[in-house]
Image (cartoon, rainbow, N blue to C red):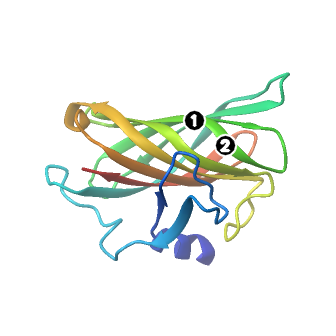
Amino acid sequence: MAIREAERRRVLSLTSSTGGATFDGGPTAAWREASPTVGTPRRWGGVARSLRLEFDGEVSQKQEMLDGTRQVVLEGSADGDDHASWAITVTLAWTMGDEAEIEEGDLALSRDDGSEVYASLRAGRYRESGLPGLEGAAEGFEAAFNIDGGEGAFASSAGSVRLRGTFTDERFAATADVWMK
């Protein structure tokens, strides 16, 4: 539990010069510590907005295709520091193996007032043995998404979402760091 709490306090962001970023220290990506104020909730009407959400939910769909592609759909909920309830739907797909680049993905975040954020996968990594630093995980993933648009309060938003989590056959838990402008 102490490892999970330490992970919650550490805010990381992905910088990438191309869409082919990797999470293993490749030349097009680097994990770097963010400023201490990133991850602190800010008012949604301001210029820069960030929020950390702790989701848990179910694996609503899990498929293994004949071409070796594996796909999962995760659906869950979280209560935000902004006193709002959030829902998430994430679809991730990768070629089967112990470790793989996530090749396809999309994400939708919905706030209880009907506002929504839509994002497309920029880069991601799947690990069958879970993620370093998170205990008890059957399978793990980390992914970066670019915000494509939204509805309601987020209709003209741009930014990114970093999602890191674990899942079993039935359940998942993930942390989403959302940055919007």
In the picture, the disc for residue 102 is 2
In the picture, the disc for residue 173 is none
Amino acid under disc 1 = Gly
Residue 167: horizontal and vertical position, in percent? Answer: 69, 48
Residue 136: horizontal and vertical position, in percent? Answer: 75, 62
- Residue at the spot x=30%, y=37% of the render? 112
Label 2 with label 1: CB-CB less than 8 Å? yes
- Residue at the spot x=76%, y=33% of the render? 70
Q: Secondary structure at mark 1?
A: strand
State how many labels appear: 2
Instruction: Determine which quarter of the picture holds residue 6.
Output: bottom right
Determine which residue is flagged by label 1.
105
Quarter of the image where the N terminus is located:
bottom right
- Residue at the spot x=61%, y=48% of the render? 124
Q: Nearer the viewer, residue 177 or 149?
A: 149
Q: As drawn, is 49 to the left or to the right of 165?
A: left
The span from disc 2 to disc 1 (Cα, nearest Å) is 7 Å
